[in-house]
Structures are given as structure tokens and as C-alpha cells.
Amino acid sequence: MTVEQISVFIENKSGRLAEVTQALGDNGINIRTLSLADTSDFGILRLIVDKTDLAKDVLKKHGFTVSKTTVVAVEVPDHPAGLASILKILDTGKVNVEYMYAFVERCGGNAVIIFRFDDHKTAIDTLLKNKVNVLQGERVYNM
Amino acid sequence: MKPSVSTKIWDRDNECMPREQLEILQLERLQQTLERVNNHVPCYKNKFSALQISSKDVQSLDDLSKLPFTTKEDLRLNYPYGMFAVPMRDVVRIHSSSGTTGKPTVVGYTRNDLNTWTQLAARFMTAAGVTPDDIVHIAFGYGLFTGAFGLHYGAEEIGASVIPISSGNTDKQIMIMQDYLSSALVCTPSYALTLADRMEKQGIDPHRLSLKVGLFGGEPWSEAMRCEIEKRLGVVATDNYGLSEVMGPGIAGECQYQCGMHIFEDHFIAEIIDPETGEVLPSGSVGELVLTSITKEAFPIIRYRTRDITRLDYGPCACGRTHVRMMKTMGRSDDMLIIKGVNVFPTQIEEVLFQVEGCEPHYQLIVERSGTMDTLEVQVEVNERIFFDEMRKQRAFVDKLEKRLLSVLGVGAKVKLVEPSTIIRHEGKAKRVIDKRNS
């Protein structure tokens, strides 16, 4: 029920993001969605791609520090308070969100949000119990 | 598994000489050396007469403090052969420093000097555990630098097999270590870690090689770095000390107790001075090491300011050697950074980086001045062990480093994480400090 994501350490200097995306492109890897968290010195680029292991190898060969992490893709109703209703459910399950970002594609009229939780198992159980749709990795990589 | 330690002493008569007897020998040899430099080296003759001192005024070892210091500048002013005390026809070898900061310094050896050097290298290599059964892999650069030759002679004298591979070409070094069964590794401590890095990258387990002992020198290194090298390369990592102006490696070396390096006092006299005032400090103080050679023929040196900061321990050592022990050098008095009035040594920063879990010593210090304030930035290369996907954890790691640095140094430092391979790697000595305050 989880999705694999790769995280890349990037210094805040010009051309680094271009280098990451070019390296992926040159190897036929398609980026499904991404988010960048940054401070004044460095950033953490998080990517969901169609070929996770290949992307990790390619970036390591280009000298980047890369790690693979697990996240959860959740279908969220695309109307006012849609996200609020999901967060409320998570709150009742006592699950903390480390970070989250939105997916570019929609899934049958619904938005898709990527979550990193402190406890994935509890989070997924809570969501499923409340009839919230959690997407399979394969589905997300090929959206 | 650590191999058993060495208890063999190469030259028991001299290395274990009772101190009273040792001091008589030192004074006699010192007086002879002073007599010779006064007669044959104009630089010393002029310095002595300027202070109205003659070699006859030195009647005890304490009188040594009356004599003037010799500095690297003196050696440069007398470039190339002005400090030699014998005619060139008696000199059989010339070595010299790299000269990265001006004219190099040139040193010479007579046949007897080379013999002494060989014997002293055999002493510390035996103390480190090298035996006739060892295959000694010498990854110091062969050339004008004294490091490689000193250990080369020592190893041959012991009867070990020497691989004079020299420095550079890390992949080839590893191949030879695997195929030729190198059991003793000689290089700088930072290069030992470069080798470990490369082996890990190639999927080679260093513990499966034949290496059992490492003899590291040429730059200051911390106890934490020793642990790291021992863990990653599976060797007993030993320290030794030397500098080309005094002789090269073979001035001091560790015994199996690793509680400081025994200075071979039948050939050298050691003092500790205050680097600012030049005053001799009481026994046990931390300060700059000053060395006088008392047996060298071609290039005797009187009260040479080594710029190395250390401490001497005259207490008895369990190994039975009577020679004084110098602690690991804490840095160079000219590497010492004064930041906001606080003395900071790069080795202190290295120690902190090691202590914080998994952090390797790929770092660089940038010192700048904004207005009248000094700033210290520590750049640390990120690797997978210290990279967290969550910003909160990544920030916490930086905060932890900054807090530790503040408590150890007594002055604040900003930690900046940089991408791998940003900091230039050196196969020899590492340049750790970039001081932009005077540029």
C-alpha cells in the first residue's frame, strides 16, 4: 500500500536541479511528481519516478547523496474541506504527518496527496477503516 | 581481531638506558655538536657570538635554554647548503621540503647519518610490531620527501619485505595490497581513510586483506581517527613522528602501550616552549616542541622550532623504554587559528566530527571576517549516513554539530552541509583551512 520515493541532497547553488532532472531524462526516467524542501544552504528534493531503483543508481553515479524512503499516496476529494476531512481522520488515529505534497495527476476526479507519516501502518489502517482510498505504488508510478 | 602487540625492543641498551646515564650521554654529545656547528656553520657561529655565548658555556642540559632558536626562516636564508657542517664530498644524500611556501629547505646526510636514520626507523617500526615476516607497503611518495626512504630503510634493516609502491594511484594500491599480501601499511592517516573509502566503494572488505599494522605519519591526527582507521581497515594503527629538518621519520614512535611516542633521546634533545614568548615551559606543559640533534654530522640542528604543539611525559612507561614520550601533536602553532581571541586547532574540529555518529572527516574550515568579527564555517560533506529525508532531522543534525563545536572550541561555528566530493581530496597532506581574513 506504500509508494517508493527518492530523496536527494542538493546544495543551494545554480544548476543543481537542472543537473538532477537532466540525468534522469537522459536515462529515460519520467518524474511523476516532486517537492523541494529548502533552507538557505541546502535543499532536499523528493521525487516519485517511474523507475525508482534506476533513478537512485543514476543519481549516485552523478555524485549525489540519495536515499530511498516510503510514502503513502492518498486519494482526496477535490472540493472545499476535502483535505481537512482526511487530516481529521488521521488526527483521530493519532498519526503525525512529517510532510506532504500534491500529485500532479488526478485520479478519477479526486486529487492525490503524498504523505510521509511517522507511523505508516497505523496511518494506512486508519484511512482504510474510514473508507479513504490509498493508492498502490504501481498505480502511482504509471499514472 | 587485533593481532598480538609487539614487545620486542630493537636496541635495548640505548632505548632502556637509565635516565642519569642518558643525560650524561646527551650532554657529551650536545657539547660535541655545539663545538662542530660553531666551527663549521657560519649561521650558528654568528648567532652565538651575537649573544656572546660559546659552546663552553653549556655545562649542563639546562644551559641549552641559553642558546638561540633555529627557525625555518634561518634555513631559507642559508639556502641551499649554508647550514651543512661537513664538506659536500662527505654528503651522500640530499632531501628537501616541498617548498610550497617559498624556497624549499635542503638537508644533507653523511653515510653515518643514513646509518643512524636506518637504526632509528628500525626502532619505531619494531615497536609498532613490524617483524621480518612482514610485507611493508610504503605509500609515501618517494623523492625529495623524507617519509618513504626513512621507513624503507627501517623495514629492510628489520628484514621485512618492502613494496616501494610510492603515493598515488589508489586502485593500483588496492590491487597490490590484495595480490602481494601487504601486511604493514605506511602512509598518511588521511590516505588510509581514502583507501578504506575506495575499497568500500569497490565492494572489497579490508578485513579480508592481510593488513595487520599501519604506521601513519606526516600530519596530525586524532585518537578518534585512530579508532576509525582501526575499525575500517582492521589494523593496529600506530603513530610516529619526524620532520625532514631534524632527520625525517625516526625521531619518535609509539610502543605497544600507545601512550605517546618515545623520542629517541640518545640522538635528540626535546624541549617544550611557549610559542608566543619562546620561554621553556615546566615539565608536563602543552606548548611547541623544540628539537636539538646531537649525533647528526651533515646537518646538525640546534633548538629547532618544529611548530608542532604537544606535551612531554617523563613518567616511566610499562614497555621498559626510558625515553620521554611526546603526546600526539595537537596541531601546528602556525595552523593554530585565533578566532575571536580563542585558539582553535583543526584537529579539535576533526574530533567532534568523528564523535557525531558516522561522520567522516571530509571537512574544510573557512575563516572570514565580516566587519571586525571573525566567523568560522565548517563545511561537511553529506553522505548517506548523515542524510535524512526529513528536514526536521537534517536540521537537528546540524544543530547537534554546532552545539558540540561550541562546547569543545569555546567559540561558535556555523556548520554547512555540502554535496559529496565538493572538498578537494589530497593523496598526501590535506588542506583543511582556508583563511580569508588576510586576503
Image: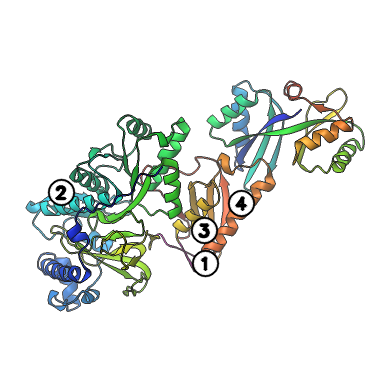
Q: Earlier in the sequence, mark 3 or mark 4?
A: 3
Amino acid type assigned to the residue bearing label 4 in the image = Val
Q: Position of residue B137 (x, y in %)?
A: 29, 39
Counting residues from the start of the chain, the first of labels 1 and 4 encountered is: 1
**Direction from residue A111 to residue B39 in the image, left or right:** left
Q: Residue furthest right?
A: A80
Q: Main secondary structure of the magenta part?
A: strand
Q: CA distance from mark 1 to mark 4?
A: 22 Å
Mark 4 vs mark 2: which is more N-terminal? 2
Mark 3 or 2, nearer chain start: 2
Kindly identify the amino acid type of the residue bearing the numbered disc 3. Glu
Which residue appears at 40% of the width and 53% of the height? B221
Residue at mark 4: chain: B
What residue is disc 2 on?
Answer: B93
Label at residue B398:
4
Q: Name the mark nearer the viewer: 1 or 2.
A: 2
Which residue is depicted at the point 34% across and 59% down? B260
Q: Position of residue B436 (x, y in %)?
A: 48, 56
Q: Residues within 10 Å of mark 4 (few under 14, many from 20)?
A: some
Residue B368 is tagged as 3
Cβ atoms under marks 1 and 3 closer than 8 Å: no
The image quadrant of residue A57 is: top right
Mark 1, mark 4: which one is toward the viewer?
4
Give B182 or B393, whichever is nearer the viewer: B182
Q: Are marks 1 and 3 on the same chain?
A: yes
Q: Secondary structure at mark 2?
A: strand
| As drawn, B64 above or below B439 | below
Q: CA distance from mark 1 to mark 3?
A: 11 Å
Q: Are marks 1 and 4 on the same chain?
A: yes
Q: Which residue is mark 1?
A: B340
Callouts 3 and 2 close, C-beta under 8 Å: no
